[in-house]
Image (tube, rainbow, N blue to C red):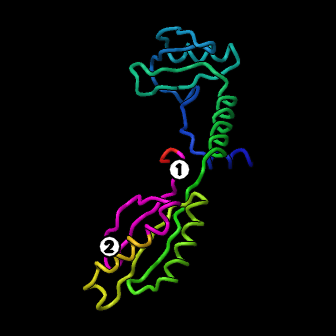
Amino acid sequence: MPVIFLWRCLEIKELQINEEIRDKEVRLIDADGNQLGVVATGRAIEMAIDKKLDIVKVAPQAKPPVCKIMDYGKYRYELIKKEKESRKKQHVISIKEMRLTPSIEHHDLNTKANRVKEFLSKGDRVKVSVRFRGREMGHTEIGREVLDKFVELVSEYGVVDKKPKMEGRNMTMFLSPITDKEN
């Protein structure tokens, strides 16, 4: 049961095997990778059964479709193993968010900048937004100045990924960590 659950979690495309193949003729490749040419599907299934293997349709879009003689269970196992290995090597980058106001004081700005420096040093991207309320909407240039000061404070840890942009009542920008390639 756990193996079936694992197969469903890993999105491996389902291939047609043995009797599921309904084409009259297929281009056949044997277990060693040698081309056997165009063969009737019934004959191809017989050849696979003689070798105690399966016939798997690997290229259904080809004319005629390409099928290969192989151990399907072993093939699926190898695919799952590769998928799990590639997931282990992935590094998930999360996006942290920091909210500011146009009337933020210098000390508060430094405190938030220090927090963002921690995020960037850990490799996370940061969404910095300035929220405008009421009459502040008439002075969006103050918010842009706040974001510019903020970028100066964190410039040694991150760079602007997306420039400041108004989205409704918020002005947002994205910072990404400085990598070794950029230095």
**Residue 147 image offset from top left, x and y in percent:** 39, 72
**Residue 96 image offset from top left, x and y in percent:** 53, 68
Quarter of the figure with residue 171: bottom left
Give the magenta range.
151-180
Q: Amino acid at mark 1?
A: Thr
Asked if the magenta segment contains residue 177, the reply would be: yes
- Residue 152 vertical placement versus 91 (above, below): below
Judge the density around disc 1: few (<14), some (14-19), many (≥20) Cα neighbours within 10 Å: few
- Residue 175 vertical placement versus 128 (above, below): above
| Residue ID at (37%, 60%) | 162
Left or right of 120: which side holds 149?
left
Q: Residue furthest bottom?
A: 134
The answer to which of 15 and 92 lies nearer the viewer is 92
The answer to which of 113 and 129 lies nearer the viewer is 113
| Residue ID at (27%, 84%) | 139
Judge the density around disc 2: few (<14), some (14-19), many (≥20) Cα neighbours within 10 Å: few
* Label pair 2/1, CB-CB below 8 angstroms: no
Q: Residue furthest right?
A: 1
- Residue 109 vertical placement versus 13 (above, below): below
| Residue ID at (46%, 78%) | 99
- Which dot, 2 or 1, sits closer to the camera? 1
Say which residue label 2 marks: 167
The answer to which of 113 and 4 lies nearer the viewer is 113
Left or right of 87: which side holds 128?
left
Say which residue label 1 marks: 179
Quarter of the figure with residue 122: bottom right
Local SS, label 2: strand
**Residue 132 image offset from top left, x and y in percent:** 35, 84
Left or right of 142: which side holds 178?
right
